[in-house]
Image (tube, rainbow, N blue to C red):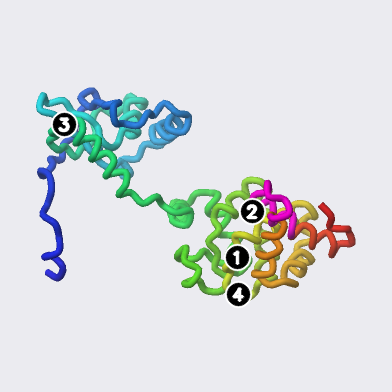
Amino acid sequence: MSGVAKMQPQAGRRPSLEFRPLGDLLIDDSYQRSIDSGASQALVKRIARAWDWGLCQPLNVAKRDDGALYVIDGQHRLAAARLRGDIFDLPCVVVASRSADDEAAAFVALNQQRRPLSKLELFKAALAAGETEATVIHGALTQAGLSVATTTNPESWKPGQVSNIGGLEYCVRQHGEKILRTSLLAAAVAFHGQVLRYFGTIFPGIAAGVSTHGVAQGDLIGMVVGSCDQSEWRDAINRAKAEQPNLNMRDAAVLAIGRAIAEAMGGTGDA
């Protein structure tokens, strides 16, 4: 097989796959992260509340010389199972441990090997699962003639593809579905047929404009935004941030695009 000669020898011992009682599974606080924080406890409760065996990957467990079993990876799943009270054992990948130091090294290696899922990947999974927010966003994009990009690499995007999932989620949570739909329609008109390279930077300003002036002004807002190209808006937003360094990029977009919309509607556009 091509490339086999370059591979390193296998390390460690082959593990065993076992179901182990919850009471047998221990945590070594010397290398494990605490799960007492609010975020960790929220995750434990979420796993427990909607337990799905199809999502329960086996715990990675070290077996010490005295037979004690210490969880290297999977303590949130273990805590969730204990919280439920109707789960009595869990699937485990059990490997012999030489020391707690080896377990700590394995803990670090397991966490370093993980690649966090991107917003784009999480959105696609949520849409496939039929989650309400993802379905609303997908519907609004489709209505506007837009679609979700297949990657986060702008070089591969086709005209009308977007990847600013976080911004779309923020819009629907803060302003609601009607504002999201109108904002996407305005953006689609403004940048029709274009690769939306700076859409994530510009969109918060469009959504804020629609929220401030109402959905009835969606066509006007689309015309205002379409009067400049994306790179010009990017530069205007960067200038707004330079004027007020304490602004984040979302607020800078709101300021820059808000000025242009206000001017077009007969206001001064001053902020």
Secondary-structure class at tag 2? helix
Between 40 and 233, the residue placed more toward the observer is: 233
The residue that mark 3 highlights is 99
Query: Which badge, 2 or 3, comes first in the chain's sequence?
Result: 3
Is there any visible trace of residue 39 in the rendered image? yes
Q: Which residue is mark 2?
A: 249
What's the distance in space between the residues labelled 1 and 4, CA to CA?
11 Å
Q: Nearer the viewer, residue 52 or 16?
A: 16
How packed is label 4: few (under 14 Cα within 10 Å), some, or many (20 or more)?
some
Is tag 1's residue or tag 3's residue first in the polypeptide sequence? 3
Secondary structure of residue under mark 4: loop
1 vs 3, front mark: 3
- Residue that label 1 marks: 198
Instruction: Specify start and end residues of the magenta stretch as a single range.
Output: 242-256
Between disc 4 and disc 3, whose residue precedes?
3
Q: Amino acid at mark 1?
A: Tyr
Mark 1 neighbour density, 10 Å: few (under 14) some (14–19) many (20 or more): some
Q: Where is residue 260 shown, x and y percent of the image?
A: 79, 62
Q: Quadrant of residue 95?
A: top left
